[in-house]
Amino acid sequence: MSDCLFCKIISGEIPSSCVYEDDQVFAFNDIDPQAPVHFLVIPKEHISGADAITSENSAVVAHIFEVIANLAKKHKLDGFRVVSNCGQSAGQTVMHLHFHVLSGRDMTWPPG
Ligand code: AMP
Ligand code: ZN
């Protein structure tokens, strides 16, 4: 999608601090970290959010969680939280499906 910030990050048009990439997914550090470790994992295919996951595109979501588990092991994360905000009222600001991975501090529950 030409006007999508995260599609531009995937293409390299906008620079990012990449932590992992393969043919299906891209992961990079959040520009405004909310924890000592805060990166985003996104599908390379433009999917607008968690409400746009279908039987046709859902395989990448399983792959994203496999990548998250591998990155957690690689970086020896001692507990982490995965968050996907969906819709404006839930705090989604970029309309390209993404999973926040947060770690390195105690988390509170429920989230705000
Ligand atoms: P959300 O608010 O759940 O849609 O998450 C979007 C996230 O993208 C926020 O945590 C932002 O800090 C992050 N973000 C926005 N622009 C960039 C960028 N250029 N590079 C890295 N992260 C970004
Ligand atoms: Zn996009």
Image (cartoon, rainbow, N blue to C red):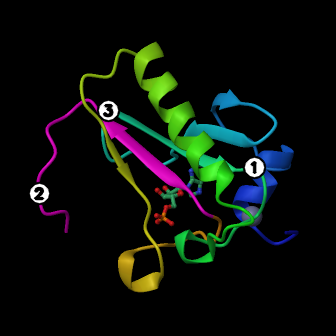
Q: Position of residue 56 (x, y in %)?
A: 75, 66
The quadrant the C terminus occupies is bottom left
Q: Which mark is residue 36?
A: 3
Answer with left or right where residue 92 lies relative to residue 108.
right
Quick one: 62 or 67, which is closer to the camera? Answer: 62
Q: Position of residue 14 (x, y in %)?
A: 78, 49
Q: Position of residue 94 (x, y in %)?
A: 59, 69
Q: How far apart are labels 1 and 2 at the CA level?
A: 31 Å
Q: Callout 1: helix, strand or loop?
A: helix
Q: How many marks?
A: 3
Disc 1: CA contacts within 10 A as few (<14), some (14-19) or many (>=20): some
User: In the displayed structure, would residue 111 be above or below residue 17?
Assistant: below
User: In the displayed structure, would residue 52 be above or below residue 70?
Assistant: below
Look at label 2 and name its amino acid: Trp
Confirm whether the magenta stretch covers residue 2. Answer: no
User: In the displayed structure, would residue 14 be above or below residue 89?
Assistant: above
Residue position marked by numbered label 2 in the rendering: 109
Residue position marked by numbered label 1 in the rendering: 9
Whether the residue under disc 1 has CB within 8 Å of ligand 1: yes
Q: Earlier in the sequence, mark 1 or mark 2?
A: 1
Q: Earlier in the sequence, mark 3 or mark 1?
A: 1
